Image (tube, rainbow, N blue to C red):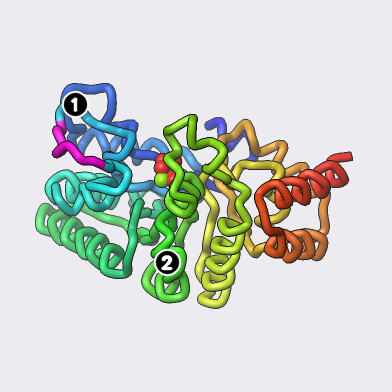
Amino acid sequence: KGALENGAEGCGLFRTEFLYMNRPDLPSEEEQFEAYKSVVAGMDGKPVVIRTLDIGGDKQLPYLPLPREENPFLGVRAVRLCFARPQIFRTQLRAALRASVYGQLWLMFPMVGSLEDVRRAKGFVEQARRQLARRGERAGEVKLGAMIEVPSAALMAPELAREVDFASIGTNDLCQYLTAADRMNPAMAPYYQSWHPALFRLIGMAAQAFEQAGRPLCVCGELGGDALAAAALVGLGYRKLSMPPVHMGYVKQVICTGRCTDMQKLARSLLERQTQSEAEALLNRYYELAVQ
Ligand code: PEP
Ligand code: MG
């Protein structure tokens, strides 16, 4: 509701793990179906990107004990957990496929690192579809997409773009894995550089690959709602930015008052910066002039 009131053209990221948290057991297919249906039906036919379960790493479920890992962010997380617990994954996929009858539902897989991951996840969707068909239940058309938040997936963007209907850059994790700086550790803040030129170069390459393939690519991490970076993202080729509703006004202000050619110039210049502080200074200069 907040998104629509602020002029959103869809929901770029529905983090479904919140349905699984703060409760004693797994949510049933029916509960999930109702939750997805209410969001999809409530968005006036605009697309809703539902991200499949992203548990592990920083998010744990008390009723789903996972083996202790030395590096949980590099371990059994997100789709990797779903592959290891196929019943949980298929239940969620059936709920989403049923809800897709009520609007435009796009389904997105987090933490894919390879084409095999994407193909395997798509195989699960087909299985869930067959299960629903056997039960005589309706399932709608869904677009299938991947989050690009592992550097290996970003570097495979040209191939990935042929394998999925859409993708979305998860800049929170992409930055963490690219800079090797734990996003949860305050002591790592100086190393977790979300305006690192390397991050802009990587997501710039991904934008080119998806543009060539004619497939939509969104930014759905924190950077997507960062008013300082918004013009540069447009300049790099991004046409879909996902953000909390409260950021929409600031981001629209900077994008809608600027010219695309200036944003492209900004993006080209940004890709030539050598350090985060140089990048930040450039973004700041553009922003100050844009919102004057
Ligand atoms: C991301 O990693 O950028 C993202 C959007 O997902 P999350 O913050 O939930 O890991
Ligand atoms: Mg993430």
Q: Are marks 2 and 1 in contact (CB under 8 Å)?
A: no
Q: Residue at x 32, y 44 (%)?
A: 73
Mark 1 lies on a secondary structure that is loop
Residue 208 in view, yes or no = yes
Looking at the magenta stretch, what is its main secondary structure? Answer: loop
Which corner quadrant of the figure contains ligand 1?
Answer: top left
Q: Residues within 10 Å of mark 1 (few under 14, many from 20)?
A: few
The circle on residue 62 is: 1
The stretch in magenta equals: 64-70
Q: Which residue reaches farthest left?
A: 134
Looking at the picture, how far across and down is residue 281, in whole percent?
77, 46
Q: CA distance from mark 2 to mark 1?
A: 34 Å
Residue beneath the point at 30% across and 64% down: 118
Of 131 and 65, which appears nearest the observer?
Answer: 65
Q: Secondary structure at mark 2?
A: loop
Displayed quadrant of residue 109 = bottom left
Q: Quadrant of the C terminus?
A: top right
Residue drawn at the location 82% of the way across and 61% of the way down:
262
- The residue under label 1 is which amino acid type? Pro
Viewer-nearest residue: 8 or 14: 14
Q: Is residue 152 above or below residue 281?
A: below
Is residue 86 located in the magenta-colored stretch of the structure? no
Specify the amino acid type for callout 2.
Asp
As drawn, 2 above or below 210: above
Question: Which residue is label 2 attached to?
Answer: 165
Question: Residue 198's x, y, as percent?
Answer: 58, 59
